[in-house]
Amino acid sequence: MTQTITPRVRTLVLLLLATCGLLLTTAGPASAHAALTGSDPQQGVVVDKAPDQVSLTFSEKVALSNDSLRVLDPKGKAVQQGKPFEVGGTTYGIKVHSGLPDGTYTVTYQVVSADSHPVAGAYTFSVGAPSTTSVSVSGDTAGGGVVGWLYGFGRYMSYAGFIVLVGGAAFVLGCWQRGAGVKPMQRLVVGGWLTLTSATLLLLLLRGSYTGSGKVGDVFDLDLLGNVLQTKAGAALVSRLLLLAAAALFISVLFGAYDKREDEEKRDLTFGLAIGGTVVAAGLAASWAMAEHASVGIQAGVAMPVDVVHLLAVATWLGGLTALLVALYRSDAPIESAAVRRFSQVAFGSVVALVATGVYQSWRQLGSWSAFTGTRYGQLLLVKIGLVALLVGIAFISRRWTAQLADTLVRQNKRAPQKERVAASASRSGKSKGGGSKRAAQLARQQAAMDTARQKRTRDADPNRFGLRRSVLAEAGVAVVLLAVTTVLTQTEPGRTEEDAKAAKAASSSSSSSSSASAGSGAVTLDMSFDTGGTDGKGVVTVDFDPARVGGNEMHVYVQRPNGRAFDIPEVKVALTLEAKKIGPLAITPDRIATGHWSASNVQIPMAGDWKVAVTVRTSDIDQTTVSKNAQIG
């Protein structure tokens, strides 16, 4: 008889799955893990002579394709020629046609960062004088859309499959070897293998479109698939599939020949399975470590093995927790108290390893305390830390229930052999009375079924077992949400990278401003940070006045996200006030030129003075703010 899950449990599980879906669907496109830190020509600049090439500098190495860098004229026609090339270090360039006419040009880029995530964006520069342009390119296209959502779902399912496969097998082999003959436990581990294999194949098919066009139709493009197989991420996915073939052999032995062996043979086989299973599990974990965050940045040689240990600790803890949940809810065979205590000890060791490796990873990815609250990665990490703390707190309650349950399980296990002897006696009695072997077997089965049902009723009525089942179910629920947050975290730009990119961009802007001042251009540039208070409401607005004199001026407004990418917002307004002369505010409504770029021509400044420049930024229908800064004009 299979234990039926109560409607309350079903409701809790559905609520947790809905929460995870919400986290995954609101995660948005994968954040860039390599940020644009500089360009030549620079964003928004007006050059007298058309350049021979356009170059872009990123915060780390990136991978290029033939269409990674494009330069578009005001009508949207491509004016680049040849293939993108590496200029040096982390700078990459593309040649453009000679003799470009005056106007505003748009540079678009779509590359793949060293940790396998797509990076895309756009900016503008002008030759001779700014002009209107028909080009409108969003800076958030990489990794978005249906393909991006499917890729995020595939990543989540691959993590879930890995945790169930590794943790479930470790639970059976190390804590409850009788579980090798329990059907629900077999289905759990095999289900983890199937989930991880299916998700890996899905990621392999989606990879080319995910880092490229983002079109669903390109998922089955064999040329794209061939290109993916030559990348680091593609090699990691193929390696994972090969290791899963070895894992299939491990599962067949664990749930096939293992349970039928004698005790002495089983001990030898346990040792062999433990060694082989550890090697396969570590290899599967390494397929993530060698292609993602751990493989780039500082101390990569240390970070990758630490990441492997971290993933194995997560799988042993959460996967074992899932297996324990199945044993408590779905298994007809009573789980021994010794098995529960062994898992409690294993879980404690896993949590210690998880915390130790997590502290190192946090330091490596953040680099400063301010990054906890000043970057999206840090904010998500705080949520993850809170969930882990909650999980540990519930686990402490489970350990208390485990201690109270131990005596009950011992008594139940002592009574089990006696019931088996009674059933055997009934079988022999049936035969002695001449009822025939068929009738005796039928009576024995009926007696066994009645004994099993009675045992389950007694077991389920035990308040200690009921408490343990509820606390383990709560742990599993928190673990599902924790896994969703972790999946989003792996797709988010590390705090250290984001802050380094900000610093490099600030240094570049400062250098550019100094050069402009020394050249005596007379232009004024004002940078102002803003926060509208809504979702995704932070950014930086830059206002340029050229030549910043009395009379007519060109004004350009650029709106960027904190990581330097163009920010596509619905509206920007500017107002000028000369408070000393009680002039203003003079309202200016610039025209949208491109994503994150507005411009206004012939802005009249009536007299020289210390003008207050107030900029109103609206990021949604209801979220807006006004920031201001003074500038000497004229």
Image (spheres, rainbow, N blue to C red):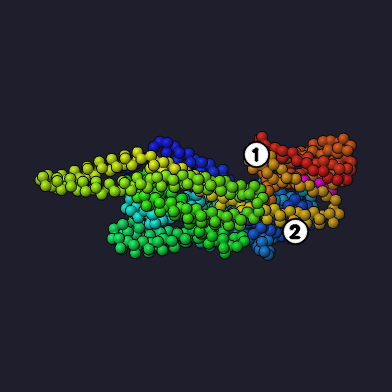
- Give the Cα separation between the discs numbered 1 and 2: 40 Å
Residue 216 position in % (x across, y down): 52, 49
The secondary element bearing badge 1 is classed as loop
Pointer 2 local density, CA inside 10 Å: few below 14, some 14–19, many at least 20 = some
Q: Is residue 464 above or below residue 223?
A: above
Left or right: residue 472 versus residue 53 is left
Left or right: residue 387 versus residue 258 is right
Question: Can residue 542 be seen by looking at this rendering?
Answer: yes
The secondary element bearing badge 2 is classed as loop
Label 2 sits on what residue type?
Pro
Residue drawn at x 39%, y 42% is: 464
Q: Which residue is mark 2?
A: 51
- Magenta-highlighted residues: 543-547
Q: Which residue is mark 1?
A: 534
Residue 169 position in % (x across, y down): 40, 55
**Mark closer to the chain start, 1 or 2:** 2
Label 1 sits on what residue type?
Gly
Pointer 1 local density, CA inside 10 Å: few below 14, some 14–19, many at least 20 = few
Q: Is residue 40 above or below residue 526?
A: below
Quarter that holds the N terminus: top left
Residue drawn at x 45%, y 39% is: 12
Quarter that holds the C terminus: top right
Are dots 1 and 2 in contact, CB under 8 Å? no
Which residue extends farthest left?
A: 434
Q: Is residue 425 magenta?
A: no
Residue 242 position in % (x across, y down): 44, 61
